[in-house]
Image (tube, rainbow, N blue to C red):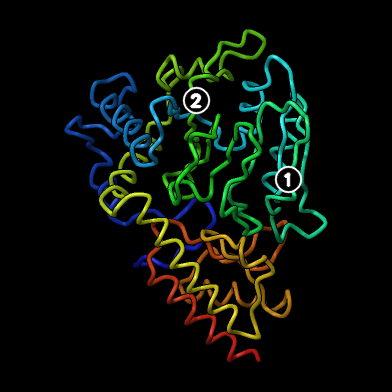
Amino acid sequence: MTQRIHNFCAGPCTLPLSVLEAAQNELTNFAGTGMSVMEISHRSKVFMQVHEETLALAQELISAPPQFKPLLLQGGASEQFAMSAQNLLAEGGEAAIINSGIWAGKALSEANRIATMRCIWDGKAKDYTTLPAAEELSIGDKDYRYLHITSNETIGGIQWREYPDLGIPLVIDASSDYYTRDIPWERCAVVYGGVQKNLAPSGLALVFVHENYLVDHPEIAKFSCYKTHADANSLYNTPPTWQIYILNKVLHWMKEQGGISHFNQFSAEKSAKLYAAIDSSDFYYNPIAPEYRSHTNVIFRTPSEELDKAFVSAADAAGLSGLKGHRSVGGLRASLYNALEMASVDALIDFMQQFEQQHV
């Protein structure tokens, strides 16, 4: 392969070409050090500048108030399923969760290994094709410490348009629509996400924790305590320097493009064009309730599993990669993350039309 292809992979994601080229140019000699950023000390002045700037940019671009501390933590979002529960339920109590799909279900299962998390709404009966309306949600007189939600189900292709407000703090897994939309910070305790969807290579989570929850918890492992990492400015242990370096470059690129407002609109435009192509066809279909369709992960199917497989194979040959649905659900999926250009969506739609004509 001698040229870039159209990359619809759900994670790791496609990254801005300008960022990759800049990293390529600096790979063996970063900032005049004669070393790669992966080789220099994380305590060196040159890396500390990248580290501090990355934290500041991350906070600025998503408009996180100063009461929220940004943390760069290893382990990705899956580690945060446990870590958020460990910190917010360390002194006891219960939390609530809305089970919107596979990732919310994993968060529920993991948290219940540590404390008690109650599912107050479960989409399983409807195959996770919809989300609850405001009037369907209630916690009664329960004194839950927080409500956990998954803002966008990467596998299921479903997304909250408005974050629920039940009068208790939110813990948001924002992994697959991170930095594509605004966050209701005034209602949040913790916001986290793996960076591999929109921001950087996998292996890193970007976590924002309200200062009220930066508490020392002697009953949990020191490494699992948010305060440990906040006090050390995310340098408690050797950080993943490469991921932070790429994250820095992507955040700069995002700022140059127009920030969250730009990508919010761009995500809506890309997904609307693809959904229109699906809905106008008798060959493809999307099962998600239209008002909750994801702007970043568009799932769809052909009339049969055999045609789904043929679609993926032919798409790969045509230079459209990553369109196979998650192994747990099958089907097809196009992830439209921030660095994916509209030209890729147009190429996919053209291919879909050609494939349909060949198989009707």
Residue at left offset 41%, top offset 20%: 235
Give the vertical position of 25 relative to 45 (above or below): below
Query: For mark 1, what is the residue?
Result: 137
| Figure quadrant of residue 55 | top left
Quadrant for the N terminus, please: bottom left
Residue 322 is situated, as x and y percent measured from the top left of the image, at 54, 63
Give the alpha-carbon distance from disc 1 to disc 2, as whole Å: 25 Å
Residue at left offset 52%, top offset 41%: 194
Circle 2 residues within 10 Å: few <14, some 14–19, many ≥20: some
Q: Earlier in the sequence, mark 1 or mark 2?
A: 1
Toward the right, the furthest residue is 125
| Figure quadrant of residue 61 | top left
Residue 124 is situated, as x and y percent measured from the top left of the image, at 79, 54
- The nearer-to-camera label among 1 and 2 is 1
**Secondary structure type for disc 2:** strand
Q: Which residue type carries mark 1? A: Leu
Task: Report the disc number at residue 210.
Answer: 2
